[in-house]
Structure formats: C-alpha cells, structure tokens
C-alpha cells in the first residue's frame, strides 16, 4: 500500500465513525440533524488544543469525544421541543453557530485555523490500524445498540413519539442518549482527523461536511449499520477514483441525496433487502412449479 | 367498591373553545365503565387529559389514591394507565409481535442505561404472544404491523395496552370501523378481559354493544357531564335522550 492509499483508507475509517454517529441520532432515533459537522469540529478543535498543550493522543481524543458529547447533550436538551423539519433547521443553525464562533476566536486560530499540531507518534500504517480498530469498535457498538432494548426504544421514538410515550418510553431521555452517543462518536472522528491532518480549518467542519455525512447515512439506508458503512466507503472513494467527480462533489452528493430520498428512501440497505425478498419469492415460485 | 381512578374538575380549552367544562367522575376497581356522548362531546379529550397527552387547564387525577396530575404521560403509563387510540397507531417499523413485546418490556426500557445493557427479547416476545392470543391475532404475530386490516390493528392496540400490565385500561372507540360480527366478538373479548379483574373505561359510539357489555355509563355532551349511572337508568334520562336524538 502506498502512502496515498493509506491516507485514503484512514479518511474512510474516520468517515465511518462520523457517519455511524449521525446514524445513531438520525437513523436509530429518527432525529434529523443537519449540523453533525459542528460536533466533528468540537472534537477536532478540542483534541488539537490538548495536543498542542502536550497531551498524549489518547487523552486528546478522549477530551474531543467528551467535549463533543457534552455539547451534543446541550444541543439535544435545547432541541427536545422541536421535531422534524424544525429540528433540521435548529441543528443547521447549530452548525453555523459553531463556525461563527470558531472563526472569531483567536485561541482557535480564527480563519487561519490551527496548524503545527504535534504528530500522533504512530507511523502512517500504525495510525491507519488505530483508526480502523476504532471504526470496528464503533461498528460493534452500533450493532449492539441496534439489538439492545435501547435500540428497541429508539425504534419506537423514531416511529411515533406520542405512542412511544403511551407505552412508557421516556422519549426525552432516549433522544438525549442518542444525541450524546452520536455526537461523542463525531468527537472521536474529529480527534482522529486532527492527528491525521495536523492542520484544521473552520471550513473543514462547515455545512457541506454536514450534508456529506447526511448523504452517507441516507444513501446507505437510514438506520442500517452496514448500509451506512458501504455508502461511506463509496462516497469517500468516489471523488478520488473519478477525478472529474471531485470538481462536482457537492452536486453529486446532492443528487444522490435527492435520488435516495425520492426513489429509495431506505437506501442501499432497503434496495438489498427488497432484492433479497424478490429472489426468495422467485425461487419459491420456481420450487412450486417443479 | 373502592375507587381506582378519581377524575376531578377537568377543564380543557382549545383557544376559545371549551372542550371540557369542570367534569368529574370516579371509576371503581374492576368495573366496566363506558364513556358515551355525541360527536364533539369531549370524550377523547377526556381520556387524553387523564393520560396527560394534552395538558388540561385544571384537573386532578388520582390513580389508586396517588395524585398523578403533574406527571408526564410515560410515568402515568408506568403507574398503570394504558390508552389505546381511536385512530390506530402501530409502530410501523416493527412486526405485530414486537409492537406488543416493546410494551411488555416496559421495565427494561424504564432506565436508559439498563436498556443499553440488555439484549434478550425472548421473555417479552413470549409474553407478547400470550396477549396476541388473548385478543385473537396471534396468527399474524410475525407479520409487519403495516398493512394489517383494521380488525387486526384495533386488537393490536389492545394487546399492546394489556402488555403494560395496567391498573386501568382506557379504550378509545375500539369497535369503530369493525363490521357488526367483528364488533360483537371484540366487545366480548374486552368484557372477558374485564371479568378477569381489569378495570376498563371505554369510549364507544356503538350503543348496542355499550348497553350489552357496559356496567355503568358516564355521558358527556358539549364538554359537560349530563348523566352517570347504570345503563338502563341513564338511557331513560331525558337529557341523554335529548342529546342523542335532539330536543323533543
């Protein structure tokens, strides 16, 4: 593997953690968020400040995770009263608020960003292994949550909040849990990005990034862990393999997002499932004929 | 007979419209109470106020002597108030069985952290199957809750409510939309459940079934209570007749 492939794979790993974080909030719990990049940014900037102050990597990334989770919890608390499209607009506002604050803070480097972030201490390949290990852990955690009673309650909240309350689900507590966990994952992704890029710019965490992550989740199939992972790999690599896409990245992501919402609201996972059902029916029909 | 649910002075305004005007009534332990009245009388609003789905301007609700007036809906449900909807609302992403299993696991989902740590659903699914058998729809247990006929989803609502092991079962027009055969059969099911000791409060327009299975009637009209008593006596009440067939 050349250096280029290693960095690509590292970015894929970071994006998987980021997308699975949003999948926890929007996929599992049904709370749409258009400001996920802000939490990615909180994690990245916190880790950068800790790293520059001399903290070792585990401390810096943990600090990023905790900071993003706490901000996520606060945003979640403030968003408890809004639903659906209002929640989308509120979270979008949080994304812009984050950028606005970062751009004005000298300690965060303002428009120039933070540069000269210390090295992770790992070799390129060693860092890739770390990122992929964490991505695997986050995947395992997501699959566990999906199967647990928490995931069961998330399904109820995502389906119908009012009915969930009638069957004793503490909707607010579950939404806050989803926000805290999903944004903490974004914080981990941000911390990993900090040590990977070693240079942060406010625009890395802007609205475009939020929409990119949302496309990964929507194209993969909202709520499906493996669908989201596959879509994340595809959407991260596509602009690299087809250079011409890179210039029209936003257009392509936007078109994919639209196409997924319009034609396959359950994304790749839904398409795979209906194909499977179709094949099963077909073989059954053939068996009955013979 | 002791009171299980004591509803006092419920007043609900929607903007300038008075939906309920200082209505009080008691529900006795183990009885089958029917809440009736013409369209727009405030029956559904009453059940929604009792469960806390809407916030009344004034109301005091005591469940088994405990004041639950200021508790959120999910806590009232945990204490034993189960509500079914007039317009059925199954969880669309789940199978029929899981709709009920989730409710049967109300203890497991009570705390977020313990919910996160537990995975096994087999006990609750077994219980859920029992409730589905009780209401007679266990043959569709594995099917998706979406696309089931109304007769099934109405029963599903009741099974899901029963899975909460409630003290009082509040039913909002469980027979509406069913044909007459289904309605009779389902009313019998509810009456059976009541005979096994569960207190039932049912809103229903189907007067035939109400008079057949109800033990006591509370009649609402225009947001006010106009009658309360045994079915035969209530139906002789001129006010009730006027409300239903118009003034003579």
Image (tube, coloured by chain):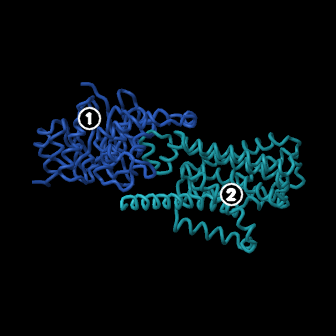
Chain colours: A cyan, B blue
Secondary structure found at label 2? helix
Residue B191 percent coordinates (x, y): 22, 37
Chain bearing tag 2 is A
Q: Which residue is tagged 1?
A: B193
- Residue nearest the observer in this picture, B9 or A85: A85
Residue A255 visible in this rendered orientation of the protein: yes
Point 76% across, 41% down: residue: A62
Residue A117 percent coordinates (x, y): 88, 51
Q: CA distance from mark 2 to mark 1?
A: 53 Å
Q: Which residue is tagged 2?
A: A95
Residue A92 visible in this rendered orientation of the protein: no
Instruction: Tell me the number on the disc at residue B133.
Output: none
In the displayed structure, does residue A79 sit left or right of residue A108?
A: left
| Rendered image quadrant of residue A248 | bottom right
Point 81% across, 52% down: residue: A194
- Residue nearest the observer in this picture, A8 or B154: A8
Q: Residue furthest top?
A: B1
B135 w.r.t. A3: above or below? above
Secondary structure found at label 1? helix
Chain bearing tag 1 is B
Q: Quadrant of the C terminus of chain B?
A: bottom left
In the displayed structure, does residue A197 sit left or right of residue B137?
A: right
Asked if the residue under mark 1 is in contact with the one under mark 2, i.e. CB atoms within 8 Å, the reply is no
Residue A71 percent coordinates (x, y): 68, 46
**Which of the two discs, 2 and 1, sits closer to the camera?**
1
Residue A26 percent coordinates (x, y): 58, 53
Mark 2, Cα crowd under 10 Å, few <14 / some 14-19 / many 20+, is many
B134 w.r.t. A274: above or below? above
Q: Are dots 2 and 1 on a single chain?
A: no
């Amino acid at each position: 593997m050349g250096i280029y492939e290693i960095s690509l794979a590292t970015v894929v790993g970071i994006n998987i953690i980021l997308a699975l974080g949003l999948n926890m909030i929007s996929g599992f719990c049904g709370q749409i968020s258009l400001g996920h990049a802000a939490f990615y940014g909180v994690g990245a900037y916190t880790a950068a400040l800790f790293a520059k102050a001399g903290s070792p990597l585990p401390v810096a990334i943990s600090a990023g995770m905790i900071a993003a989770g706490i901000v996520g919890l606060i945003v979640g608390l403030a968003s408890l009263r809004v639903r659906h499209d209002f929640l989308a607009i509120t979270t979008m506002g949080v994304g812009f608020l984050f950028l606005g604050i970062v751009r004005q803070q000298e300690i965060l480097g303002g428009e120039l960003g933070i540069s000269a972030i210390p090295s992770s201490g790992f070799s390129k390949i060693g860092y890739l292994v770390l990122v992929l290990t964490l991505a695997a852990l986050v995947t395992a955690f997501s699959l566990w949550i999906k199967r647990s009673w928490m995931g069961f309650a998330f399904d109820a909240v995502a389906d119908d909040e009012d009915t969930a309350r009638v069957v004793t689900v503490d909707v607010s507590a579950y939404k806050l849990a989803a926000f805290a966990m999903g944004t903490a994952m974004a914080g981990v992704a941000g911390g990993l990005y900090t040590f990977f890029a070693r240079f942060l710019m406010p625009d890395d965490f802007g609205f475009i990034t939020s929409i990119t992550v949302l496309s990964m989740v929507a194209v993969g199939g909202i709520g499906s862990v493996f669908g989201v992972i596959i879509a994340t790999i595809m959407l991260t690599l596509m602009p690299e393999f087809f250079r011409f896409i890179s210039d029209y990245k936003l257009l392509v992501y936007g078109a994919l997002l639209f196409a997924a919402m319009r034609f396959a609201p359950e994304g790749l996972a839904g398409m795979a499932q209906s194909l499977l059902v179709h094949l099963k029916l077909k073989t059954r029909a053939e068996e009955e004929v013979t | 007979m002791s009171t299980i649910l004591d509803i006092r002075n419920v007043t609900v305004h929607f903007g300038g419209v008075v939906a309920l005007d200082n209505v009080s009534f008691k529900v006795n332990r183990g009885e089958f109470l029917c809440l009736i009245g013409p369209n727009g009388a405030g029956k559904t609003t009453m059940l929604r106020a009792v469960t806390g789905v809407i916030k009344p301007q004034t109301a005091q609700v005591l469940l088994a002597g405990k004041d639950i007036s200021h508790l959120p809906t999910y806590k009232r449900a945990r204490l034993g108030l189960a509500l079914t909807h007039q317009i059925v609302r199954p969880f669309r992403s789940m199978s029929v069985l899981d709709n009920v299993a989730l409710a049967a696991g109300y203890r497991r989902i009570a705390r977020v952290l313990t919910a996160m740590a537990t995975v096994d659903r087999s006990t609750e699914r077994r219980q859920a199957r029992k409730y589905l058998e009780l209401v007679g729809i266990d043959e569709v247990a594995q099917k998706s809750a979406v696309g089931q006929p109304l007769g099934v989803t109405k029963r599903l609502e009741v099974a899901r409510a029963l899975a909460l092991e409630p003290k009082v079962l509040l039913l909002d027009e469980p027979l509406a939309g069913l044909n007459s055969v289904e309605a009779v059969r389902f009313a019998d099911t509810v009456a059976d459940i009541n005979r096994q000791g569960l207190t039932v409060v049912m809103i229903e327009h189907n007067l035939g079934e109400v008079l057949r299975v109800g033990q006591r009637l509370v009649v609402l009209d225009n947001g006010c209570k106009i009658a309360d008593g045994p079915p035969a006596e209530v139906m002789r009440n001129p006010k009730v007749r006027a409300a239903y067939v118009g003034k003579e």
